[in-house]
Amino acid sequence: MKKGSVEPATLNSMWTTDAIPAGTPVQHIDHEDAQLTRRDVLETLIENTPPDESIVVGTTGYTGRELFALDDRKNQIYMVGSMGCASSLGLGLSLALPEKKVVVADGDGAALMRMGNLATIGAYGGSNFQHLLLDNAVHESTGGQSTVSSAISFAAVAAACGYHEADEAINREQLKSFLQTADGPAMQHFRIRRGVPSNLPRPDQSPADIRKRLMNHLGISTAWSEL
């Protein structure tokens, strides 16, 4: 089906919740209090992840696309079409390259899809793993359908799974502190405002080419690196 074949339609979600997650060991922040956009957060992420010292994994959808549009750096990889897999790839990279800081820019919908990753990260993740979970309470890249993120606390789940640090945040100073000092495995559940820049581009290289670029940047060579 070609883009534009279906007219826009208003989404009327049947699901709402006013409940604050029970038993959370962290301060709960409402989505209505979000201050920054996804772009704001990713700009700060780029500023705090030097290419020679870190790797950034962007989840599928608008997160990867906005990261690419802001600055397509060699230390970044975009999980195109791999919903929920960014955190597991990030964990693998952090274990294989303990001298590099690995930051996963995840989303609420993707994290909900593969919540089992949090347990694996808590069990195996090292001090160089940072999990930045951007939450706008919707599947924005597929039309804005509601997620159930308002009914849970990702930070509380992460803490229960063994993350060394886990909190909720909404402002830039909290984000900077997390990126600069958090001892992993660490999660920051960051509430963001909805909205997407107009004419947002997609990565102009294939996922395989971006993977090769990252491997070359890291100086990694394998028998399958040219496949």
Image: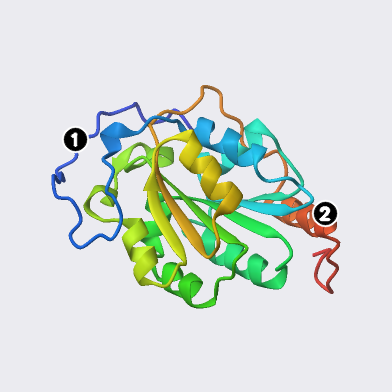
Q: Position of residue 182 (x, y in %)?
A: 54, 56
Q: Amino acid at mark 2?
A: His
SS class, disc 2: helix
Question: Which residue is disc 1 drawn over?
Answer: 12
Is residue 29 left or right of 3 when viewed as pictured? left
The structure residue drawn at horizontal position 48% and vertical position 32%, both measured from the top left corner, is: 3
10 Å neighbourhood of mark 1: few (<14), some, or many (≥20)? few
Q: Amino acid at mark 1?
A: Asn
Which of the two marks, 1 or 2, is nearer to us in this view?
2
The structure residue drawn at horizontal position 41% and vertical position 58%, both measured from the top left corner, is: 166
Is residue 144 left or right of 130 when viewed as pictured? left
Q: Position of residue 103 (x, y in %)?
A: 59, 54
The structure residue drawn at horizontal position 60% and vertical position 62%, both measured from the top left corner, is: 90
Q: Which tag, 1 or 2, sits closer to the chain's start? A: 1
The structure residue drawn at horizontal position 56% and vertical position 23%, both measured from the top left corner, is: 199
Is residue 121 left or right of 27 when viewed as pictured? right
SS class, disc 1: loop
- Asked whether the viewer can see residue 2, the reply is no
Image quadrant in which the C terminus is located = bottom right
Question: Which residue is disc 2 drawn over?
Answer: 217
